[in-house]
Amino acid sequence: MIDWAQVKKLCHEVGAEDFDEVIALFFEEVADVIDKLDNLTDRSSLAEDMHFLKGSALTLGFTQMSHLCHSAEKTAATGDAQCVDIGAVIQCYVDSKQAFMAEYLMKLAA
């Protein structure tokens, strides 16, 4: 679910002292889009939303979410936005965040 090698790479790139800020910004920006999706009535920008989530997820190593958003982006871009299971995307984010935070907090405590 989480690519820890990517997480480690990102931490190295931004520096350990700034990594918590990167994580907080990721969760804030993604939560804004997730909230938008949770209340979505017009799916005309769904492909763009999925593209944003896909890229954000890849950056922080949320591989399962990234794959799901990639598929949803392709579906929405071909005119089938109504076929995208937004609930699955939201649940994947919730599960990925929970898995990430559980492991990350254990690493901090060690």
Image (tube, grey):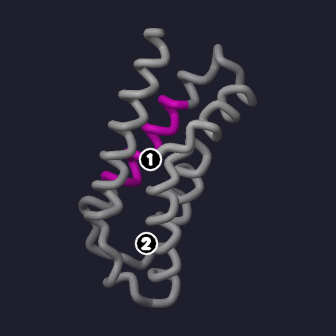
Write down the residue under mark 1. 30
Label 1: how many Cα within 10 Å (few below 14, some 14–19, many 20+): some
> Three-letter amino acid code at disc 1?
Val
Identified at 31% across, 46% down, the residue is 94
* Percent coordinates x, y for residue 82 in the rendering: 32, 83
- Residue 69 picture location, percent across and down: 47, 65
Q: Which residue is mark 2?
A: 46
Please state if 15 lies on the left or on the right of 53 as rendered.
right
Q: Residue at x 43, y 72 (%)?
A: 46
Give the image location of residue 101, x and y in percent: 39, 29
Question: Residue placed farthest to the top in the image?
Answer: 110
Q: Which residues are magenta?
A: 23-35
Identified at 36% across, 76% down, the residue is 43
Judging depth in this view, the residue of 12 and 24 nearest the camera is 12
Crowding around mark 2 (Cα neighbors within 10 Å: few <14, some 14 to 19, many 20+) is many
Q: Quadrant of residue 52?
A: bottom right
